[in-house]
Image (cartoon, helix red, strand yellow):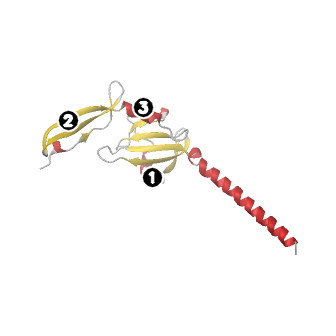
Amino acid sequence: RQGILDQSFLSSVIIKEDLTPALIAGFPIKRLAQVNGVLIGELNLLHMWYLVDSIRIGSQGIVHILSSEGNLIATGDGRRKKDVFLQERFEPYDKIPQILKPDGYVFKNPGEGEVLAVGVRLKEPLSWTVMVEQPTAEAYALAKKISILLIFIMAVILLLALAIGYYGGRKE
């Protein structure tokens, strides 16, 4: 028979009095499939903040970690750090389903302009969303360079074909 003690538990992220993030975790201690006790502890998430701060995608891309409720837990965006302390929802919250799609989602980020965002939801018990956000100008820069290069190559081939046709047709 399974009871509540057979299940692991993770609380929502809390901001402690010393302004560090933490969560409470509980795990059953089993011996021979019998629960003998529960290990409960507070997990400090300060190093996760440092890690998220240090990650850059290209030169301007950043990472956000969102709770299962959509609140910012950690962010590489200095302007949004206050939202972590205030435990505010990520904006635009209503776009998270589109951001989780394989192609990501392009939206206007407050104060930054147009960005491409793509994310993934972690499995239980966390159910957090890890999201990468990058300005579209930087995200699509390589594709734009390749497009310009292809147009240039096609123009050169077209000019060569015209020149060969012109000089070939004059000989008759």
Residue holding disc 3: 50
Observer-nearest of 152 and 10: 152
Q: What amino acid type is highlighted by mark number 2?
A: Leu
> Rounded to the nearest whole Å, what is the CA distance between mark 3 and mark 1?
28 Å
Packing grade of label 3 (10 A; few <14, some 14-19, many >=20) is few
Disc 3 secondary structure class: helix
Residue holding disc 2: 39
> Rounded to the nearest whole Å, what is the CA distance between mark 2 and mark 3?
27 Å
Q: Residue 167 at what x, y percent from top left?
A: 85, 68
Q: Residue furthest bottom?
A: 172
Observer-nearest of 60 and 149: 149
Q: Identify the residue shown where x is 74% and y is 63%.
A: 158
Position of 34 with respect to 163 (left or right) is: left
Residue holding disc 1: 98
Nearer the camera: disc 1 or disc 2: 2
Packing grade of label 1 (10 A; few <14, some 14-19, many >=20) is some
Quadrant in the picture for the C terminus: bottom right
Position of 74 with respect to 152 (left or right) is: left
